[in-house]
Structures are given as structure tokens and as C-alpha cells.
Image: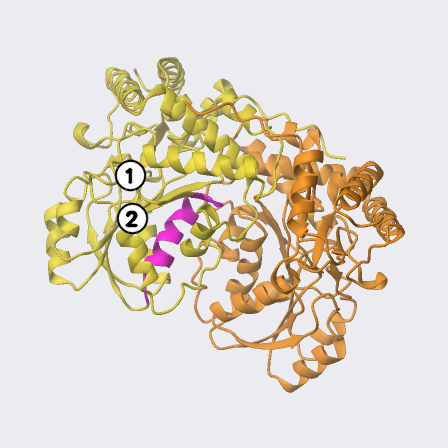
Chain colours: A orange, B yellow
Amino acid sequence: MPKPFNPPPRILLGPGPSNVDARVTRAMTAPVLGYLDPVYLECLNEIQEQLRTVFETRNEATLALAGTGGAGMEACLANLIEDGEEIIVGVNGFFGQRLADLAERWGARVIHVEAEWGQPLDMNKMHEAFRKSGARLIAMVHAETSTGMRQPIEELKSLRDIRDAVTIVDSVTSLGAIPVGSDRNGIDASYSCSQKGIGAPPGLSPVTFSERAMEKIRRRKTAPRSWYLDIQLIHKYWSSERVYHHTSPASMNYALREALAMILEEGLQSRWERHRTNSESFVAGIEAMGLEMLVAPEHRLWTLNTVRIPAGIDDAIVRKRLLEEYNIEIGAGFGALKGKIWRVGLMGSGSTQNNVMLLLAALGRVLEQEGFSV
Amino acid sequence: MPKPFNPPPRILLGPGPSNVDARVTRAMTAPVLGYLDPVYLECLNEIQEQLRTVFETRNEATLALAGTGGAGMEACLANLIEDGEEIIVGVNGFFGQRLADLAERWGARVIHVEAEWGQPLDMNKMHEAFRKSGARLIAMVHAETSTGMRQPIEELKSLRDIRDAVTIVDSVTSLGAIPVGSDRNGIDASYSCSQKGIGAPPGLSPVTFSERAMEKIRRRKTAPRSWYLDIQLIHKYWSSERVYHHTSPASMNYALREALAMILEEGLQSRWERHRTNSESFVAGIEAMGLEMLVAPEHRLWTLNTVRIPAGIDDAIVRKRLLEEYNIEIGAGFGALKGKIWRVGLMGSGSTQNNVMLLLAALGRVLEQEGFSV
């Protein structure tokens, strides 16, 4: 017989999951309903409307996939790429690289536009690559979880309209915490996750597809190989047709609905402002301690703050001590930034003044004990 | 602001989800942990060991995919099929047909072995098709959710060993309620779901891959297109390597762990026996009312009981009345059996004597009021 499972009350200040509000946890305990129960279908309708508000779009095809953010990335690529077609992919971090790798798996000829990890992509280079190619697909990461960099996406619309292209934007670490502005910015397909800015447990991937994206998908010569992530089939269940595709994950959708309700009650503007303010407080504290941020101020994410690890300090020991002595989780760097940065998430219900103060105090104490003079 | 969400307390006697025990619901409310938290990794280790017991296997690659049962089906096919290779697929229901359709999407040349919906596959025909082909893959459904038919799988091992093939078995509606016997029966890859015999909410897909299956996958010429369901990458996270793939759905895994713990406390034998007994009681009651079962006694599922709709009775009205007047959900037939059968699930914590008595009483009353003389 297994031991009782009573996980410690971690303060989740890593790259996600972020802490889940008790209201959201409680929502998850509502009775599970069948996937065609009229009461359940009403819940799905509400989620679609809530997600449209948070994505800032009127896209009909807006829904939550039954998988994590990675499923959302794959869904966008698997549905939009046809064999051998060109795609421009911005690569300046682990998730940009993953976008490029997955696009290749899904049969695309990938044209990489690169920037240093932690730096934004140069939109002039994107323009140039797009003009020189015949590509009708452009993909980039809005909030690069591996570096803490926020990509300006305001020029995406004019870029896309040069040649009726379809744009794909990774909003995994921005949605619900940093404005995405899907319609305003000319985003045709975007995928996110439930466990960061949204504030629900991990397991769902909110996605939105514009009419332009859906039209490209409808005109495919062959169905995408992936049936589980076939957005036309999934949309037939979420739309009024209600054609069975898979058994909808009820408890997770209850959590998502409640987390989205909390976002709308707080108001998008206030929520963005809260994330900005707490991030800025954290940065001020970090700099006051003599530490440095990886990303330039104007390109920092408010959700995921990347701190350079000072010389002589052991990355793993500091994280282990924070976890074991203070129950605080922060994230390690990875890929090119492994051992060079910490990734500090202040997202969803975890983005609070108290968490900022507590982490600064705990980190300061651990660093002092490890020989860094704060 | 959305209305409070208080779904009615349905008695879920459809094809799944089944009702979730309060212990499992409560487990879901444990604090979410990071995907590399040592306490969380211990939880995943326990799930793997529990799943091995329930699948009756020692397969190392036994884990829960972050998607529903359909993701499990796709994972088996996407990883095991290489372009243009032959696969024998048994088709005698909606999910057998889906297996065949997905195998085709994933590039296989599909050799169908068919039987009438509700009848088991003829293993001699499987043998014959396999011998005549060059196929190294054989796929079939153990518990066909669309018809209520249980496929005998005891001969699979001898069939497989004719030519070192890899077998894929759909255990979506059997695992945790009807013996699957993966190792004993020569099953190399199997996928199930969390919300039927297991008794957790929908959203996860337990899978198991034998060493023979993993070896076939390791020898692939190209990686499967699907990255989200790439079992080698996923297994690298579930194994001691702990390489990041996606953010593990913590709350769902907590629920799965508790549901599996309840199975092991009850004991597999007792649990199977409970499902058998309640199914038989239900059938006795149905036949006493003058109704008929679709499937012959020796091939009936204990989880999903299919009742022929009597002449002159309106399928939809009866289901609607059961739902609205008694809060009882039962399932409609679909595909070739639409309007011809009801699908009555008695699974997980929903397989109880009380549920059997209540449904028989409610159905009897509705049928009488609709003009059928019970």
C-alpha cells in the first residue's frame, strides 16, 4: 500500500507550474460530467468565450487542447505545415529551437532567423528572410521561457500582409500575464498552457486559430498525420456540431474555467500591471543585491525573470537550499544557459509582492552563506 | 462574471467517464509541484509501478501520457509504424475502425480483418491474414467500447511469435476492470484511459511498451513525426534520466495515483470479480424486463453493457428522460449501431449493486411510460 501523498507546500517560482489558487483547485473537485452532457457543453462554451477575451481575439476556433503547451506547439505546426513547404522560424532560445525542430519533423523546409539567446529577433532580418523566401508560414516565440526575453510582435501584422502568410506565435509564458493582442498583432495561430499566466494546473493548452489559418488548413491536400491534434476534428466537438473526438478532460476544464474567471474579474489591464510591477520590484531587489539580469530592461518578461548566477556560486546548491530550507522552487537555466542563469517565475497567483520579498530575502541569505557578499 | 458552476450529481453509466470516488477527487487537490521536484518524481515512480501491476507486465516503458485514450492510440501507431509498412488491424467496431484509420494516417498499409460489429474477430482469419502478409505489426481492440464486445486475446502470443511481430492492444475499456494480462498474452504495446476502469477523471492515457516494441522503435529509420507522443523522449523523462519533455500534469497524476492505489487495495482479482458480478446482475435484470443484450454472453464486456433498444421506443427520449428525471447518464450507440443500442457503463467506482438496481428501476419506469410493457 502506498504511503499517503502529502506534498510540501512549495512556493513555485520556477518556469511553471505556478501556484494554483484555492478557488481553482476547488473548481476541479466539481463532479465529472459526460462529454455530451448539456451542462458540460455550457462550460466549454464559457471557456471559449473567456479564452477569446484573454487571447484578445474574435477567432471562432479558440479552445483548450487536451494536452500541455507542447501539444499546442505541435498542433499549430502539424495542422499548418504541408510536406515540403517553407517556414520562417525565429530562433533565439530553447523554445524557438524546438519550434524549428518540430517544424522539420512535420515536413517543413525551415528557414532559421537567429539571434543570440536573451536578445530579441531583429524584425528586419525576419522581413528580409520572408521576402527572399516563398514561405507562407512565419513562427516565433513571444515569451521565450528559456531566456526571459519578450519578443516585440507589433510588426508581425505588416510582415504577414506582405504575402498573405499565416503567423504562429508561442504565447506559453505570456498569455494571461503579458498582452498578446492576437487580432491587433496579426497572429493567426497561437498556443499557450494552463499552468503559467493562466494559473490553473498543467495539462491543457489554450489555442486560437484565425479564419486565415483555418482556411489554409481546410485547403490542405492531405489530412495532417496527427489525428489527436487535428484541429478541424477537435473544433467539430467544440463547435455546435459536437461531433465526438476524444473524452474531454472535465476536471482540468473546470480548473481552466475558474482560472479564466479570476483573470476576467481582475481585469486584463490590472493583471498585466500586477505582473509588470512585481517583476520590476524583483529586478530592483536583485540589482540592489549586486546581481544582474540577463535581458535588457525593454525586453524582459514580467513572468519569467532571468538572473545571472554570480561567479563562484554553485547553481545547483543554491536551488537545492532554496527548495529544502525555504520550500521555494526556482528554475535552472538550460541549453546554452545551463549553469549561467536562474529563472524566476512570477506568474498567475504567484506574482505577488510577498513572494518577491520572500524570495529576495531567502536568496540573499543563501548567497551570503555561500560566500557572495550581498 | 460567469455564473457559479455547480454541475448536477450525475450517475455516470455511459461509456465513460465513470464516477470518480471522493478519495480520488481529494487527491487531485494536493499542491501542484514542479516537474523536477523530487517529491513529484517519487509520485511518478509509484504510478509506473502501480500501472505495471494493473497492466500485468514488467515492461520498463510503462507510464501515463499527458492526453486522453486517443492520444494513447496515436502514440502506439505513430511510434511503431514506419512509412509504408504493413499492419494487420482487427475491425469489428468504431474503435477498431479508428485504429485502422489512424494507422493509415501514420503511413501504414493497412490489412483489415473484419467481423460484424458486436462479434469477436475470428483468430483464424487473423492468423491467415498475418501469414499471407509480411506484416510485423498486429493491432486489435480488447474491449470495443462501441459494441460492448470483449475480444479473446489469449492466442495473440502464439500469433505474434510466428514471425517476431509487435502486437498493439486497445485496453481503453478493460484496464482496471477486466484482466488484460499484457505479458501473459504477448501484448507489446497497449494504451488505456484514466476515466473508465481506473476510476480517475479523463485526461491521461496509461500506456505500456514491451522491450520488443521499444527495440522496434529504437531501430526506426526516421523519428516519428509526432514529438508530443514520441515515446522515447517521454520515457527519458519518466526514467531516471529525467530529461525535460513537457510539463507533467501534476493534478491529474495525483488523481491517477490515488485511483490506482484504490485498485491495488481492492485487489485486481476482487475488482474484476466485482465488475463481472454487477454486469451479470444488470444483464439478468434487463432480460427479466424482456430486453435483449447485443453481445453473446461469452463475449460481453463487464464494463460496458450494450442493450438492444426495443422496437417502437425512441432512443433519444429515453436517454433524455433518464438524464433529466433521474440524473442518470447512459450512452447512445454510434456508427452502425446508432439508434439500435444503449451503452451502459458499470466501471470503476460506478460498478455497484446500487447503481444496477437504480438504473433497472428507472429504465423500467421510463420504458413503461413510453409504452413498452416491461
Residue under the image location 48 percent in, 77 percent down: A84
Residue A200 pos. (x, y %): 65, 39
Please state which amino acid type lies under the numbered disc 1: Thr
Note whether B60 is above or below A115 in the view shown.
Answer: above
Residue A190 pos. (x, y %): 65, 59
- Provide the residue designation for mark 1: B57
Left or right: residue B56 versus residue B200 is left
Q: Say which quarter of the image contains residue B286.
A: top left
Q: Secondary structure at mark 1?
A: loop
Check contact, mark 2 vs mark 1: CB within 8 A.
yes
Give the chain of mark 1: B
- Provide the residue designation for mark 2: B210
Residue under the image location 19 percent in, 46 percent down: B115
Q: Badge 2: few (under 14), some or many (20 or more) residues near its Cα, within 10 Å?
A: many
Left or right: residue B173 versus residue A97 is left
What residue span does the magenta drawing correspond to? B64-82
Q: Is residue B72 magenta?
A: yes
Q: Is residue A83 magenta?
A: no
Which residue of the protein is positioned furthest toward the bottom in this rendering? Answer: A132
Give me the disc on residue B295: none
Residue A20 in sight from this viewpoint: no
B245 or A357: which is nearer to us?
A: A357
How far is the residue under mark 2 from the one under mark 1? 8 Å
B237 or A83: which is nearer to us?
A: B237
Left or right: residue A192 versus residue A267 is left
Please state which amino acid type lies under the numbered disc 2: Ser
The quadrant in which the C terminus of chain B is found is top left
